[in-house]
Every structure is written in structure tokens, then in C-alpha cells.
Image (cartoon, rainbow, N blue to C red):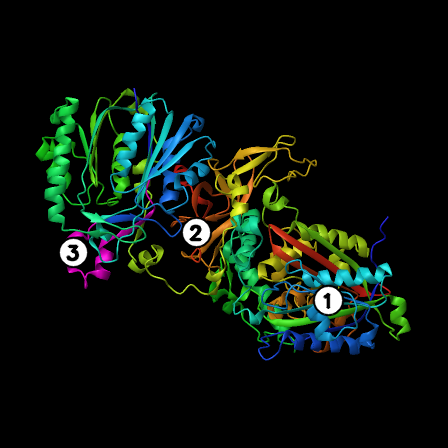
């Protein structure tokens, strides 16, 4: 039976304190006062839809054999590239085999649930295990309602026929050009219509009727739904829809508005992943996506769910937070305000596409080499082994390092070099079992760096080429706080 | 079997421009200033120079990628001129070219030149620049202070020193160099500083503060070299000869292999050992009279004392604080003020270090002159980062030593 075999997510560590946003913009838009509670997640300068997807996928896959994955689908309304397969970058970062089929989907906030429905059908039809990732880092205009209500996050679901923790019971979709908001290709921000109309005509009628039709079609009574997930950026709309269709108020899943915000297309996956972390067997879950129509997916958890775990999970990432109460810092890291960067920022970051293609396993996959002659592990892989014991030429086999824990050998906090988030932390690191590299450290927190500190690798933007509109990706090291807290 | 360079080549003359923010002067002005001093010192005519090497490192904002600018600036007499670049060790590279050319018998008199005009870059510190396609994709676009500051983290971890103790010790390195530079009319920075000021300066790259970093300046320096026989035939009586020239370049072991702990320069240790062997020096702390090391940062000088074998491993902090390397100490280091006070016009630095050792050995260092008649002077020139670098050790001395 087709269903969800694994789940995981990612939430950026940066959390804008909404009260500080109001303190900065309230003079201009006092009507937003009611929204100025709690916090929302946002991408640091070196995170985007792609990097969040990679982390969510890693969180989902854990140490599962990635060789069984046949397809990768990436859903977002904020894809980094309009024409460069975003999902293929994720595939390279996950070091999946080249024979994986990768697909980007977009178009509305419903695109992730639609991709999921498509994945269920494909897996059912023997397309093979499909990794379905939804990610969102959409831009909201400073001082807008969306700035308060939205958040950035990603989540991944592995769709399979085997060992599922939640099986698919059925789906139902409608497509209707109901334009509650829109964003033309190339535009940065949404244009939105009145929320009352969206609530009453959109959620109150289109969503309600689609749910009713789905329940009827599948022969399930609304009262049987244990968990109701409707990622909606309008307050209390989930509760209102549930009430209208007859789903119990207790079944409405917390939309994480207080701690994350609405992650657009990714929100249904984020909430589902969060729910599955603590779900019991035999629960019926309704997952709804809304935008240019409506998708309804009904799932039922199995016994497997009790032992199913992601690495950190949405709840783990929610706990690992960096509260930002400096609104100007938020604006700057989000690219809405250009602070004077100085001459060092002029360094040309032009991508060398030939070299990047040739070295894609090294750069995107963090694949090093293990010398078959000496056993020496090194990064990057080179024609002649770095081993000093003997001269070994073209003896290295691929040796992936992305999932290998590392520790700090040397470090500094550099205030001179250009960084959008100074100081720039970097140093030499050593992987468990061997292999070294010079690495940038990201998400450095209150704890000060020390030689020997445990690290884990994360996929990030290395450099942004503003002149040509390109993002260069590579791996960085981040303090492994879970390890640190254990010690 | 290689017999080494010892005493095969003598320094016929040297010159060094004033280092500093030479806003009004072009690279050509700096070149002529250094060259005319060397030419007068050597007592020869420009037509007698058979070949020249030019060390310069940042050609995009400097003189361009060839030897032509030197030939044009000095109107060299239609001779071979080769530009060499090896990060910050470029000045020592030009010396290697000239010295080896003379030793091989290919030319009688050769010129080693280094010049750089960093104050035309517009940067405080060295400019951000590419380090190669692969490095730019997987390396870190850090700054020089950031790369060298990492030495401190590993050094502290290795020997268990507190950040405060280390900061105090490297502060003394800078205080000592400023004391020396204050006496040198060719130095860029000529004001003494206090330990308190060093410790309270803003951080550039933790734990290095402003005064832990060398200056950035314009400058040129050069050496005219020949055989001892030709030098004598030209009327020179007291000769300073080259005792050792060694260079070691990282092959990636520190960065990619296993075993290096980040607290020292592997290359300097290898180069120093080779230089001592070539020069016939067995106890460097006793036999060497003067050290001019690549103090791009105070912490670099600190660990270099151990890498050169003049301090025990883990003992440099104590030696520094005990004044061993002060101008009146057991083994003065940077008696001219070092990179700290001269600044670091990259291609010129290796030759500027040599210039001071040359002057001191000949007793021509004025109010900086070491009174115990220096015999051997070592200069150590370093390019790159601690984990990936080129390190040169040059020993010169009295011919009879």
C-alpha cells in the first residue's frame, strides 16, 4: 500500500521577533499591531529554498539507504532559479545517483500537496520510491501583513510502498481560478485581495466543499478525522473550516503561527511532518492544500509510526533558535536593505560553470576520496593521494563526507573579510575517521567556538554573484548543539 | 651531489626605499629610489647587470604580469628580466633567481628586485582576490588576519594557554617591533606603542587586534649579487655572502592530510632545517646573530620562533616575555621594526629583511646597530596561510664566518 515511509523538516535558526518588526514599522502600519506576537522564521543570507530543501531531505532520510530513491520532486513558489533545475541541485547535494528523476513544481501554494498526490499515483504505478520536498522562503514586503504571518521552512516526505508510517486512504482535488493573491513571474512580492473575502469565499466555500466531496467520495465521516491540517495564513480559519465540515475542534493541528509562521507551499508538509513526530497508530489525518483550487489528502497512520523518527525533526529545529529583535538586521539578511558593504564585497564571484560541472560531486555533494592503496581519506579527491607513506596515483574512491561528524582544529572570528553576517567564522576541521578541510562555520550561537568542538555539515550558499544572478552552493560546518548538549 | 650555495655568492650592494604611504610616488619612483642606492653601494654601472628577477604579487593593481615594468623603470640594458610570484615570499624568490644565476656561472652580476604599491588598491589590508578556480569553490574567502589568527586557537589548545596570556605575549611582540621601528627612518610606522594600547585595540580577527597586524604600505628593495671573486675585483673588502637559501612549499598535507595540528608552520620547520644544514649551523639560537622574520601578524612571529628552532616548542611565549628577541636581548628579532612597522609591500618584504641583516653585518645600521658585531643574519619570508604556504629561509653572514 502506498504511503509515507519517512518524514523530516527544516526551520532556519533565525526568528524575527514580531514585536520588533512592529516597533520599526508600526508608525506606518499601526493596523498590524494585533499580529505582533511571537516569532517567525526567516532564512539567513546563505539560505534559500534549495538549502532548506537539502536539510529537510537529510532530516527525512536519516541513515536510510538513498539508493532506493527513484524520483525527487521539489515544490515551492520561491524556487531560487527560474531556469536551472532546482531539484537537481538538491539531488547533487544528497549525492543521489544520476539516474534519479528530478522535477520542480510550482504555481501556487497548493503545489506541494498536488506534487504529493502525483507522487502517490506514481509510486502506486511502480515509479519507485519518491522523495517529495516542499520549501518556501518567499519575500514579504517590509511593513506588510505577510511579513508578520509568513515564515520560512521546508519539509520532506519519502513516498513508498514499503514500511510506511502513514498509508494513503484517498485524495480529491478541484481547480478553480480563485485569485486571493498573485505574483507575476519576475516580481518579488505578492499582491493580495481582502482577507475577509478570502476567508468566506475561498476557505469558507471552495475548501469546505472540496473537503465534503472528498469525505463523501472516500466514505469517511468528518468525525473520524483525528488530525486536520490546513496551512492557512489567516487566523482561526482552520478552526472555522473544521467546524463547517464537522471535524472536531480537537483535531485541528497547531499551525505553528506563534513560532514559525506560514511557510506557504511547504506549510502542509511542515505541519504533517511535525504531527508525524508524535503521532499514534491508526490516526486518520486530513491534509489540505489551497491555491488555484484545493487538494484534500487523507492518510492513516500505521504501527510503524510509533518508532518513526526524523533526525532533528521540525520540533528539534524549532527549539534550535536565534531570536532576532533587530529589525534592521532582519532587513539586511533578507536582502531588503543594503548596508554599506565596503570594497571587499566587490570581489567577483563569477561562477566557473565548466569547473563546477566537472567538480560537482566535490562541490555540491561534499564527496572526498579514500585511497584504495593507503586508506587515507581526503577532501577533495585528487589525482595523487595526499598520503605521505607512498605515492598513490588515481587510487581514490568516492568517499561522501556530508553526513560524517567533524570537529574544530582551528578557528577564528574574522571582522575584516566581507560577510553579510559578520564576523566570518571559519577554520580547519577534521572529520571523524579522517579527512580535513577548511570550512566556514555558520549558525554560530552564544557558545564560543573551541578547538575540538563537535560539528555537522550543512548545505549553504557560499557566495552570491549579484552581477550575474547566480548562487554558488557549498557545505559549511555548524556547531552540533545536540552533541554539545549531550556532553 | 648538490654542494649547496654557501659562500658561492656575495652581496655587492643593496637598496631599500622608504616604506609607507607614498601617495605622491609611482612604482617607478620607488624602484629608482631603491635601485640607485644599491647601484651606488655596489659601485657599478647599470650596464654591468647581466640579468634581473622581479618579485611582485598583486599584479592586477600593481605593475602587471611581466618583468617589463622593471626593465622600463630602471632602463635595464636589454637583459633577461623575469617576474616571479609566490604569494608573500615573492621577494625571496627573486633573490633565489639572482643568486642561483650567479652561482651557476650564467651571469656575473645579477639583480634581485621586489616592489609593490599596495596603497593604490584602496583597501585597508590586502585586497580580496581569487586563489584559483577550485579554491574559490571550496575554500574560504577569508582575510589574511583571519587565516593567521587560527594559529592562536590551535597553539592555545595544544599547550593549554589562556587567551589572555597569549594576547599579552603577542602584544609584547608588537611593542618590541614598534620600539625598533621608531628608530628606523625608512620604516612606515615610527611611534612606540604600549602593551595596554595593543590589548585594548579593536579586534580584526579573533584574537588578533589592530596592533597584532602589520601595516600595509608601498615600498621597494633590491640586492645586487655577484661572486666573491668579482666583488673583490670591484674593490669590496668586507663581504657578506649567502650562507643558505631554502624554500619549502606546502604540498597539501597540512590542509588535506592528517597529523598537522594547526599551531605551527610545517614548511618553515623544513626550510629552517635545510638552511641550517646548508649554512653549517648546528645551534641556531647561539650561532645566529639576528632574525628578520615574517611578522605579518604577531602570532606568526611567536610560533615562528619555535619553527626556526630558536625557542623550544611551547616556549616562545616565555622567551618573548623574557625579552630574548628585544633589540638588546639574546637574539634580536625585527631590529629594524619588521613588517609590523615597515608594512608589507609584498614583493619587497623578503629583500627588505635581507637589507637589514646586510647593514647590521657590515656595521652600517646607525642608531639601530647591534654592538656585538653580528655574524649571521637569518631572514624568514612566508607566503600563503598557515595550512597552505611557501616559506623561505635565507641566511647571510660574514664571508669568513
Q: Is residue A26 left or right of residue B141?
A: left
Q: Quadrant of residue B291?
A: bottom right
Q: Which residue is mark 2?
A: A470
Q: Which residue is mark 3?
A: A33
* Residue occupying image coordinates x 24% and y 48%: A150
Labels 3 and 1 share a subunit? no
Q: Which residue is mark 1?
A: B354
Task: Tell me if residue A394 is in the magenta stretch.
Answer: no
Whether residue A207 appears in this view of the structure is yes
Mark 1 neighbour density, 10 Å: few (under 14) some (14–19) many (20 or more):
many
Q: Position of residue A79 (x, y in %)?
A: 35, 45
CA gap, disc 3 to disc 1? Answer: 69 Å
Q: Nearer the viewer, mark 2 or mark 1?
A: 2
Mark 2 and mark 3 lie on one chain; the one further toward the N terminus is 3
The tally of labels here is 3
Whether residue B311 appears in this view of the structure is no
* Residue occupying image coordinates x 25% and y 42%: A109
Q: Mark 1 belongs to which subunit?
A: B
Q: Nearer the viewer, mark 3 or mark 1?
A: 3
Q: Mark 2: which secondary structure?
A: strand
Q: Position of residue B221 (x, y in %)?
A: 70, 71
Q: Position of residue A66 (x, y in %)?
A: 43, 29
Residue A197 higher or lower than B378, as above or below: above
CA gap, disc 2 to disc 3? Answer: 37 Å
Q: Mark 3 belongs to which subunit?
A: A
Task: Tell me if residue A29 is in the magenta stretch.
Answer: yes
- Which region shows up in magenta? A10-38
CA gap, disc 2 to disc 1? Answer: 47 Å
Residue B21 higher or lower than B131, as above or below: below
Q: Quadrant of the N terminus of chain A?
A: top left
Q: Mark 3 and mark 2 in contact (Cβ < 8 Å)?
A: no
Mark 3 neighbour density, 10 Å: few (under 14) some (14–19) many (20 or more):
some
Amino acid at each position: 500500500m502506498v504511503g509515507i515511509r519517512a518524514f523530516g523538516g527544516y526551520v532556519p535558526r533565525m526568528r524575527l521577533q514580531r514585536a520588533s518588526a512592529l516597533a520599526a514599522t508600526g508608525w506606518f502600519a499601526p493596523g498590524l499591531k494585533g499580529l505582533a506576537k511571537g516569532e517567525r522564521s526567516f532564512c539567513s543570507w546563505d539560505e534559500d529554498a534549495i538549502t532548506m530543501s537539502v536539510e529537510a531531505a537529510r532530516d527525512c532520510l536519516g541513515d536510510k539507504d538513498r539508493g532506493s530513491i527513484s524520483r525527487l520532486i521539489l515544490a515551492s513558489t520561491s524556487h531560487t532559479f527560474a531556469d536551472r533545475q532546482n531539484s537537481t541541485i538538491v539531488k547533487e547535494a544528497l549525492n543521489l545517483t544520476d539516474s534519479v528523476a528530478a522535477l520542480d513544481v510550482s504555481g501556487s501554494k497548493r503545489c506541494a500537496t498536488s506534487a504529493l498526490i502525483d507522487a502517490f499515483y506514481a509510486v502506486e504505478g511502480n515509479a519507485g520510491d519518491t522523495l517529495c520536498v516542499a520549501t518556501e522562503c518567499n519575500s514579504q514586503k517590509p511593513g506588510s501583513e505577510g511579513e508578520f504571518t509568513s515564515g520560512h521552512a521546508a519539509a520532506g516526505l519519502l513516498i513508498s510502498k514499503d514500511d510506511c508510517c502513514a498509508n494513503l486512504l484517498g485524495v480529491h482535488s478541484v481547480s478553480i481560478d480563485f485569485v486571493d493573491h498573485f505574483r507575476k513571474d519576475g516580481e518579488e512580492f505578492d499582491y493580495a485581495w481582502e482577507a475577509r473575502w478570502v476567508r468566506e469565499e475561498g476557505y469558507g466555500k471552495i475548501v469546505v466543499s472540496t473537503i465534503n466531496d472528498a469525505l463523501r467520495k472516500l466514505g469517511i465521516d468528518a468525525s473520524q478525522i483525528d488530525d486536520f491540517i490546513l496551512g492557512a495564513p489567516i487566523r482561526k480559519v482552520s478552526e472555522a473550516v473544521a467546524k463547517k465540515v464537522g471535524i472536531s475542534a480537537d483535531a485541528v493541528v497547531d499551525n505553528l503561527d506563534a513560532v514559525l509562521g506560514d511557510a506557504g507551499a511547504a506549510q502542509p508538509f511542515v505541519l504533517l511532518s511535525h504531527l508525524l513526530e508524535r503521532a499514534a497508530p491508526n490516526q486518520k489525518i486530513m491534509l489540505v492544500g489551497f491555491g488555484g483550487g484545493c487538494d484534500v489528502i487523507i492518510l492513516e497512520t500505521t504501527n510503524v509510526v510509533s518508532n518513526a523518527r526524523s533526525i532533528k525533526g521540525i520540533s528539534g529545529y524549532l527549539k534550535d533558535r536565534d531570536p532576532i529583535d533587530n529589525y534592521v538586521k532582519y532587513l539586511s539578511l533578507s536582502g531588503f536593505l543594503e548596508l554599506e558593504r565596503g570594497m571587499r564585497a566587490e570581489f567577483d564571484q563569477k561562477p566557473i560553470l565548466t569547473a563546477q560541472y566537472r567538480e560537482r560531486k566535490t562541490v555540491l555533494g561534499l564527496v572526498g576520496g579514500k585511497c584504495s592503496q593507503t586508506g587515507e581519506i581526503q577532501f577533495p579527491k585528487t589525482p595523487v593521494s595526499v598520503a605521505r607513506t607512498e605515492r598513490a596515483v588515481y587510487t581514490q574512491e568516492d568517499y561522501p563526507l556530508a553526513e560524517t561528524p567533524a570537529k574544530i582544529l582551528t578557528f577564528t572570528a574574522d571582522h575584516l573579510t566581507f560577510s553579510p553576517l559578520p564576523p566570518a567564522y571559519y577554520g580547519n576541521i577534521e572529520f571523524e575517521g579522517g579527512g580535513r578541510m577548511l570550512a566556514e562555520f555558520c549558525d554560530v550561537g552564544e557558545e564560543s567556538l573551541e578547538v575540538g568542538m563537535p560539528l555537522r555539515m550543512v548545505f549553504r550558499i557560499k557566495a552570491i554573484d549579484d552581477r550575474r544572478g547566480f548562487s554558488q552552493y557549498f557545505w559549511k560546518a555548524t556547531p552540533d548543539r545536540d552533541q554539545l548538549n549531550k556532553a | 651531489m648538490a654542494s649547496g650555495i654557501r659562500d658561492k655568492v656575495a652581496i655587492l650592494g643593496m637598496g631599500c626605499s622608504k616604506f609607507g604611504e607614498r601617495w605622491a610616488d609611482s612604482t617607478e619612483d620607488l624602484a629608482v629610489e631603491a635601485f640607485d642606492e644599491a647601484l651606488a653601494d655596489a659601485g657599478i654601472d647599470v650596464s654591468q647587470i647581466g640579468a634581473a628577477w622581479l618579485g611582485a604579487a598583486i599584479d592586477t593593481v600593481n605593475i602587471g604580469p611581466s618583468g617589463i615594468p622593471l626593465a622600463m623603470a630602471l632602463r635595464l640594458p636589454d637583459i633577461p628580466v623575469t617576474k616571479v610570484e609566490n604569494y608573500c615570499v615573492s621577494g625571496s624568490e627573486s633573490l633565489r633567481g639572482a643568486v642561483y644565476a650567479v652561482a651557476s656561472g650564467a651571469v656575473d652580476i645579477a639583480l634581485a628586485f621586489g616592489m609593490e604599491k599596495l596603497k593604490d588598491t584602496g583597501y585597508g589590508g590586502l585586497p580580496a582576490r581569487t586563489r584559483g578556480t577550485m579554491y574559490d569553490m571550496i575554500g574560504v574567502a577569508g582575510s589574511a588576519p583571519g587565516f593567521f589568527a587560527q594559529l592562536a586557537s590551535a597553539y592555545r589548545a595544544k599547550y593549554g594557554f589562556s587567551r589572555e596570556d597569549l594576547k599579552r605575549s603577542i602584544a609584547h611582540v608588537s611593542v618590541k617591533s614598534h620600539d625598533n621601528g621608531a628608530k628606523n627612518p625608512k620604516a612606515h610606522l615610527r611611534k612606540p606603542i604600549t602593551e595596554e594600547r595593543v590589548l585594548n585595540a579593536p579586534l580584526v580577527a579573533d584574537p588578533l587586534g589592530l596592533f597584532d597586524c602589520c601595516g600595509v604600505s608601498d615600498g621597494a628593495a633590491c640586492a645586487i649579487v655577484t661572486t666573491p671573486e668579482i666583488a673583490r675585483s670591484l674593490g669590496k673588502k668586507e663581504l657578506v655572502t649567502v650562507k643558505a637559501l631554502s624554500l619549502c612549499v606546502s604540498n597539501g598535507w597540512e590542509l588535506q592530510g592528517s597529523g598537522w595540528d594547526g599551531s605551527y608552520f610545517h614548511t618553515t620547520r623544513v626550510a629552517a632545517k635545510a638552511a641550517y644544514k646548508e649554512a653549517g649551523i648546528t645551534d641556531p639560537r647561539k650561532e645566529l646573530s639576528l632574525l628578520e622574520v615574517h611578522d605579518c601578524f604577531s602570532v606568526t612571529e611567536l610560533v615562528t620562533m619555535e619553527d626556526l628552532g630558536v625557542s623550544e616548542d611551547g616556549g616562545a611565549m616565555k622567551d618573548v616575555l623574557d625579552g630574548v628577541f628585544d633589540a638588546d636581548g639574546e637574539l634580536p628579532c625585527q631590529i629594524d621594526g619588521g613588517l609590523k612597522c615597515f608594512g608589507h609591500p609584498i614583493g619587497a618584504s623578503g629583500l627588505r629583511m635581507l637589507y637589514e641583516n646586510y647593514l647590521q653585518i657590515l656595521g652600517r645600521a646607525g642608531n639601530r646597530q647591534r654592538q656585538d658585531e653580528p655574524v649571521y643574519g637569518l631572514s624568514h619570508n612566508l607566503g600563503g596561510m598557515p595550512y597552505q604556504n611557501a616559506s623561505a629561509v635565507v641566511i647571510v653572514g660574514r664571508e669568513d664566518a
